[in-house]
Image (cartoon, grey):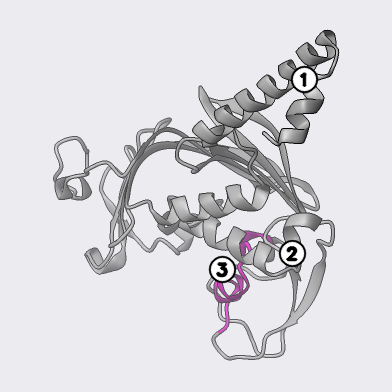
Amino acid sequence: MNKNIFIHVKNTPSHIKLLLLSVVSCFCLAFISFKGDPSNAPRKCEDIINKMLAATKGVRTLRTNVTTVERVSGKNKVLKYAVKLNTSPYKAYSKNLDDGSEVLFVQGVNNNEATINPNGFPYVNLHLDPYGKLMRKGQHQTFLWLGFNHISDILSHSLAKYHDAYNKFVKRDADTVFYKDSCYKIEINFSNYTYEKYTVTQKGETISSIAAKNYLSEYEILIHNDISWFTDELETGKQLILPSAYAKSTTLLIRKDNFLPVDIRIYDDAGFFEEYIYTKLQLNPTIPDAEFTESYSGYHF
């Protein structure tokens, strides 16, 4: 301690000394606690999201239950799945927890078609294109976007698109608990969300290719334009209306222990658009290759 300060304190009345010592003690305890436990440090939104993006890229395998809620034809469609995932090469299995149907996809196998056990009529396995009308009808996402990579890429691009995005559009709400897990809550609100004109200039463009290029929702583009399907080739010169971002607003619940997003809720200008909830999450478990085959004893293909 500085000598002059010590002499000043020494000549201070006793009741003031006690007060000063109390304040100094509290400061020291707080400093020690902060230094010894970094988790007590307040985190900025940008830090939390950057850690979340890094965590999603670190997912190699995953076991989880996924609940999807998607607005389709003005109504919210709810589906619940048990999911197994290997990110590279892409291998995925899901079981519908309501009707018992199963889907299996292994990159490079079966002509890159998914095998489906409908657990009912027509009582035989089906082999379908994950982008096709039979498999994707009434769904925002494809089976090939299970896990976190797709939404992670969209969030990363959306925030990088705007200057000073974290100050303009992002805020941290009060921390919360989600299925017994302590979570950060982040709100992203693009106040400048609008619709923009887009002209098809290249032969072979589709809604899917335009959405992928601009990190937008295929389904959102589909419902705002007179197009019958995601992969229909569009005529050059055709005018489309595209949203300026994937979502007008997004609410993220991000687990504090592993920084993975366990609840992703998305809104467009009409209100609620979609939500993806992850529970019973096992990060990077060992999943034997046999569990990505039709002959696995736990399946009914």
Identify the residue under disc 2.
224
Q: Earlier in the sequence, mark 2 or mark 1?
A: 1
Residue at point 22%, 49% (across, down): 292
Judged from the image, the secondary structure of the residue bearing numbered disc 1 is helix
Q: Amino acid at mark 3?
A: Phe
Give the extent of the magenta segment: 205-220
Q: Nearer the viewer, residue 201 or 163?
A: 163
In the picture, the quarter occupied by the N terminus is top right
Residue 211 position within the rendered picture, expressed as x and y whole percent measured from the top left: 60, 70
Residue at point 67%, 60% (across, down): 246
Please name the predominant secondary structure of the magenta segment in the image: helix
Q: CA distance from mark 2 to mark 1?
A: 76 Å
Residue at point 66%, 46% (across, down): 44
Judged from the image, the secondary structure of the residue bearing numbered disc 3 is loop
In the picture, the quarter occupied by the C terminus is top left
Q: Badge 2: few (under 14), some or many (20 or more) residues near its Cα, within 10 Å?
A: few
Residue 274 position within the rendered picture, expressed as x and y whole percent measured from the top left: 63, 46
Q: Earlier in the sequence, mark 3 or mark 1?
A: 1
Identify the residue under disc 1.
10
Q: Amino acid at mark 1?
A: Lys
Q: Residue pushed farthest top?
A: 15
Q: Nearer the viewer, residue 190 or 228?
A: 190
Residue 255 seen by the camera:
yes
Relative to 277, 281 lies left or right: left
Residue 209 among magenta residues: yes
